[in-house]
Every structure is written in structure tokens, then in C-alpha cells.
Image (cartoon, rainbow, N blue to C red):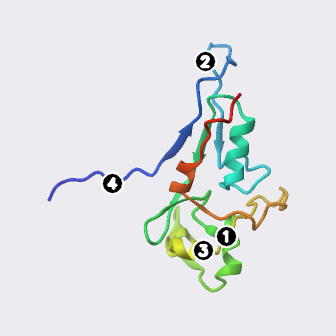
Amino acid sequence: MEDVDPPVWVVEIIALPSSPMRMELGDAPLVIARGGFSGLFPDSSIDAYNFAMQTSVAGAVIWCDVQLTKDGHGICFPDLKLNNASNIGDVFPNRQKSYPVNGVTTLGWFTIDFSLRDLKNVSLIQGIFSRSGKFDRIYAILTVQDFSDISFENCFH
């Protein structure tokens, strides 16, 4: 049997040339928008990514945390547990499971227990409760393909 490398599930989109700003040592600072502009919009929502690129410096990196679904699709989601940043508990109230996470038995709704089709009815919420919920329940969970299709071409002028 032939050895095959497993797929790599890291997604980065690097936007345009390097920043004109320089640090003391001469290197441009690196801006990484993990989950987009998640201080305002729910983490990993399409508007969080778009707003981050439209308001950031040239050369910013947009980061998508990739989780796998039960049927092997990659989704952009900030946590293994869906209940930390979505309304999964409202949609599937009886589908919690326990798994060992870093040696600790953890109860929740995990990405690996749901198909991509299941997640079509789930929407994103602010995972940090001190932030505004104004944009909760508006955005669908993005697939890695959705994320890679976002065009950042005209974000910088």
C-alpha cells in the first residue's frame, strides 16, 4: 500500500503587497485577522472577514480556523464546540455529546457530530458575551470553499 500524505486543512488568504509601515528593525508589522473583524461581527462570518480586509493595512492576513464536519467538509468556525459561537443548541437541543478534550471530559455540540447539511440551519452568534449581539443569528457558517471564494482584490485603494 502506498503512503499518502493526509490533507492539510490550513487556510490563509494573504492580501496584496506589504505594508508601508515599518517597525524599528525595518520589517513591516504583520496584521492577522483571526476570524475576521470579530469584535463587531460574529467570529468567522462573511462580514467579519470582509470588514477586516476593507479596514486593515495592505498585507494583512485573514485566518480561518478550520473544523471538520461529520461528512468531512471543512468549515470556518472558531472552536471545536459549536455552542460557543452558534445557535446550535436551539436547532438541535438533544444532540449534545461528551468527548475528552485535552484530557477533560467536555459536554457540547461538536462539529464532528453534524453534517454540512445539518449546519445549514445553524447561524453564528457572538461567542464573547461582553460584545454586542446585534449581528447574532444573521450569518450562516462558512465552508472553506466559501471562504476561499471571498474576493479581497479591491479592498485597498
Cα distance between the residues tagged 3 and 4: 26 Å
Cα distance between the residues tagged 1 and 3: 6 Å
For the point 57% across and 63% down, the residue is 80
Q: Quadrant of the N terminus?
A: bottom left
Rendered location of residue 116, percent (x, y): 52, 70
Does 41 appear above or below 18?
below
Q: Secondary structure at mark 1?
A: helix
First in sequence: mark 2 vs mark 1: 2
Looking at the image, do the residues carrying marks 3 and 4 touch, with CB atoms under 8 Å apart? Answer: no
Q: Quadrant of the C terminus?
A: top right
Looking at the image, do the residues carrying marks 1 and 4 touch, with CB atoms under 8 Å apart? Answer: no
- Read off the residue under disc 3: 109
Q: Secondary structure at mark 2?
A: loop
Q: For the residue carrying disc 1, how many other residues have a C-alpha within 10 Å: few (<14), some (14-19), or many (20+)?
A: some
Cα distance between the residues tagged 4 and 2: 34 Å
> Going by the picture, which residue comes out furthest to the bottom?
94
Does 49 appear above or below 115?
above
> Going by the picture, which residue comes out furthest to the left?
1
Cα distance between the residues tagged 2 and 1: 39 Å
- Read off the residue under disc 4: 6
- The answer to which image quadrant residue 18 occupies is top right
Looking at the image, do the residues carrying marks 4 and 2 touch, with CB atoms under 8 Å apart? Answer: no
* Relative side of 128 to 58, left or right: right
Rendered location of residue 133, percent (x, y): 83, 62
Looking at the image, do the residues carrying marks 2 and 1 touch, with CB atoms under 8 Å apart? Answer: no
First in sequence: mark 1 vs mark 3: 1
First in sequence: mark 3 vs mark 4: 4
First in sequence: mark 1 vs mark 4: 4
Looking at the image, do the residues carrying marks 1 and 3 touch, with CB atoms under 8 Å apart? Answer: yes
Cα distance between the residues tagged 1 and 4: 28 Å
- Read off the residue under disc 2: 27
Q: Which numbered dot is residue 83?
A: 1
